[in-house]
């Protein structure tokens, strides 16, 4: 694969035309690039910031069938999500892994066990296998030690899946590139170009740190920019513009030893009856999520509010009163903004955010397809529908039965790597794994020494591979998305930065001055968007 700078230079010199240009480097855009390039289309993907910078690195990490959407009558969304969930788990184990969910039942609290078991029966029927079971109070405590036993009547269990969303985006992009797609981060789409008949002829683009813009030519542009989807629409000319309602979902990361859960434990929050989870992820425990209107600047990193922190700690106290989780235990936070399509002028005031549909929607106008909404789990289906709309049918697309991820054909596990970590590595990197392990030392980043009780499986070879091969332009790209060191380590991994410099500075090609600048930039960003907010911050009421 050509280096990023070479690809960008070729693009700026106007040496290529494309069949399709995808705008947006989240999971939807990555999926479209994968399907387009895999179908033989000359494909370009551009992302204004880093790959997965937006919602696709800040989701709740769930690859789920949408049980809550089944409860609200969205049967089609649930059916598609369950089917895709099973497909993804079979294609990329180690990247998309099964996770047991437990919903405790308490006296006189909704939903009761009978109703919930009926819902799970339908869920299992859609999936084609049974995962549901009912637990007595004693069995529940075996599954979830430390759970509140006051008025506990039992629990319902079922299966879904969990992933590292930013790594999922990287893996899908890698598959697209193997089929010839050009994928560039930090390149902004400034304007849609149209011919004299108003049909799309390309895009005007601008790379970060460049003052001039440049054109690329293509008859089809697919706008997969999430909460930014309405920006590329031609105001006043499109018959049905996209109206985006940005909704924020925030999370807390707690040390696993402080809240040790081996499954996802869910309860409806007493304040607004929304489902809130505590689940294991990357050696930590995550509490999430919230759901409220986000009114901040969409070009800035979203952050959790003080009110959201209290909201999530309240459900932790309700579920695990003996754990005594407090703000002092929080390692880090993250907040993502969901791109929900809504009516422009509600007749009776805005809907409750949690009642907005999560179904994806399209807008089409003379060669530009805009998408918003939808679930991480169904990215492949959304990608194929977008391309079919833009190409006038599925005839030019590769068969729907072909996998997203190429089958594993790697070598045997090195003795220095344990079985569980080998499964993760295979899922994260697929056919690139041999080259990944040759990029640097096959030894773990010493996370335990820095964070105390947080276990570490990440290898230095992975970190150095990311620096060399995965378009790291800023330190936060590496700390927050190529790896999750900035989320699972105290103070964003500040104590690890000297060793990171020693291992990675050469691979990144940064001199000392640039490294110092990137450290300062990253630590400021982490404090502003991934740490606890100041208590005086004005927030939003639920």
Image: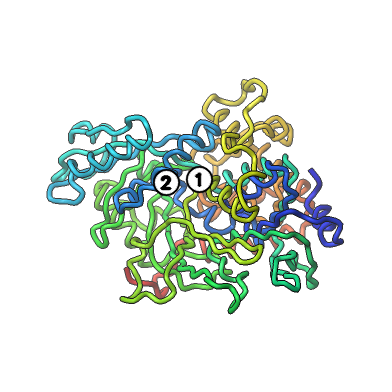
Left or right of residue 243, residue 353 in this image? left
- List the single residue furthest toward the bottom: 236
Residue on which the image places disc 1 = 451
Q: Which residue is pictured at 58% across the width and 49% down the height?
A: 383
The residue positioned 55% from the left and 54% from the top of the image is: 492
Q: Do the residues labelled 1 and 2 touch (CB within 8 Å)?
A: yes
Identify the secondary structure beneath mark 1. helix
Question: Is 514 left, or right, of 153 in this rendering?
Answer: right
Residue 230 percent across, percent down from the top left: 56, 70
Q: Residues within 10 Å of mark 2 (few under 14, many from 20)?
A: many
Most foreground residue, 210 or 10? 10
What's the residue at 59%, 26% (across, down)? 417
According to the image, label 2 marks what residue? 255
423 to 530, vertically: above or below: above
Residue closest to the eye, 2 or 387: 387
- Colour theme: rainbow
Image quarter hosting the N terminus: top right
- Residue 521: where, in percent of width, then height? 64, 64
For label 1, the crowd category at 10 Å Cα-Cα, with few meaning under 14, some 14 to 19 and many 20 or more, is some
Apparent side of residue 32 relative to residue 354 in the rendered image (left or right): right
Residue 538 position in % (x across, y down): 40, 75
Disc 1 or 2, which lies upstream in sequence?
A: 2
Disc number placed over residue 7 in the picture, else none? none
176 to 402, vertically: above or below: below
Closer to viewer: mark 1 or mark 2:
2
Going 72% across and 51% down the picture, which residue do you hit? Answer: 43
């Amino acid at each position: 694969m050509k280096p990023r700078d070479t690809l960008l230079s070729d693009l700026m010199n106007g040496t290529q035309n494309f069949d399709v240009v995808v705008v947006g480097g989240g999971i939807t855009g990555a999926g479209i690039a994968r399907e387009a390039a895999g179908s033989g289309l000359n494909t370009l993907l551009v992302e204004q910031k880093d790959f997965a910078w937006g919602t696709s690195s800040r989701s709740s990490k769930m690859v789920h069938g949408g049980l809550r959407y089944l409860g609200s009558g969205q049967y089609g969304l649930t059916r598609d999500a369950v089917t895709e969930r099973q497909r993804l788990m079979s294609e990329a184990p180690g990247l998309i892994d099964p996770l047991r969910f437990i919903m405790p039942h308490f006296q006189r609290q909704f939903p009761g066990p009978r109703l919930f078991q009926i819902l799970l029966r339908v869920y299992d029927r859609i999936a084609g296998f049974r995962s549901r079971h009912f637990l007595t109070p004693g069995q529940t405590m075996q599954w979830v030690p430390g759970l509140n036993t006051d008025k506990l009547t039992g629990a319902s269990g079922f299966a879904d899946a969990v992933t590292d969303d930013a790594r999922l985006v990287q893996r899908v992009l890698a598959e697209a590139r193997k089929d010839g797609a050009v994928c560039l981060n930090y390149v902004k789409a400034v304007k849609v170009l149209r011919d004299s008949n108003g049909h799309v002829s390309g895009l005007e683009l601008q790379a970060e740190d460049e003052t001039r813009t440049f054109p690329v030519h293509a008859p089809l542009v697919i706008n997969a920019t999430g909460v930014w989807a309405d920006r590329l629409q031609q105001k006043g000319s499109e018959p049905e513009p996209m109206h985006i309602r940005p909704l924020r979902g925030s999370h807390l990361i707690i040390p696993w030893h402080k809240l040790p859960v081996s499954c996802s434990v869910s309860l409806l929050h007493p304040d607004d009856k929304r489902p809130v989870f505590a689940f294991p992820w990357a050696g930590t425990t995550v509490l999430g999520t919230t759901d409220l209107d986000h009114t901040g600047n969409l070009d800035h990193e979203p952050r959790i509010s003080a009110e959201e922190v209290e909201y999530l700690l309240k459900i932790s106290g309700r579920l695990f009163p003996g754990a005594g989780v407090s703000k002092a235990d929080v390692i880090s936070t993250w907040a993502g903004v969901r791109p929900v399509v809504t009516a422009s002028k509600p007749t009776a005031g805005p809907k409750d955010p949690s009642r907005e549909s999560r179904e994806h929607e399209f807008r089409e106008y003379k060669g530009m397809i805009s998408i918003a909404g939808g679930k991480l789990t169904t990215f492949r289906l959304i990608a194929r529908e977008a391309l079919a709309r833009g190409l006038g049918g599925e005839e030019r697309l590769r068969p729907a039965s072909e996998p997203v991820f190429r089958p594993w054909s790697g070598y045997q596990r090195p003795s220095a790597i344990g079985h569980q970590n080998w499964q993760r590595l295979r899922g994260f990197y697929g056919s690139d794994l041999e080259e990944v392990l040759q990029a640097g030392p096959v030894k773990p980043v010493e996370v335990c020494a820095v964070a105390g009780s947080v276990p570490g499986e990440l290898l230095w070879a992975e970190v150095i591979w990311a620096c060399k091969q995965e378009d790291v332009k800023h330190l936060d790209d590496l700390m927050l998305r190529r790896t999750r060191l900035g989320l699972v380590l105290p103070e964003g991994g500040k104590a690890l930065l000297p060793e990171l410099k020693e291992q990675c500075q050469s691979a990144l090609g940064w001199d000392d001055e640039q490294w110092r600048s990137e450290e300062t930039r990253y630590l400021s960003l982490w404090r502003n968007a991934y740490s606890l907010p100041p208590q005086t911050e004005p927030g939003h009421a639920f």
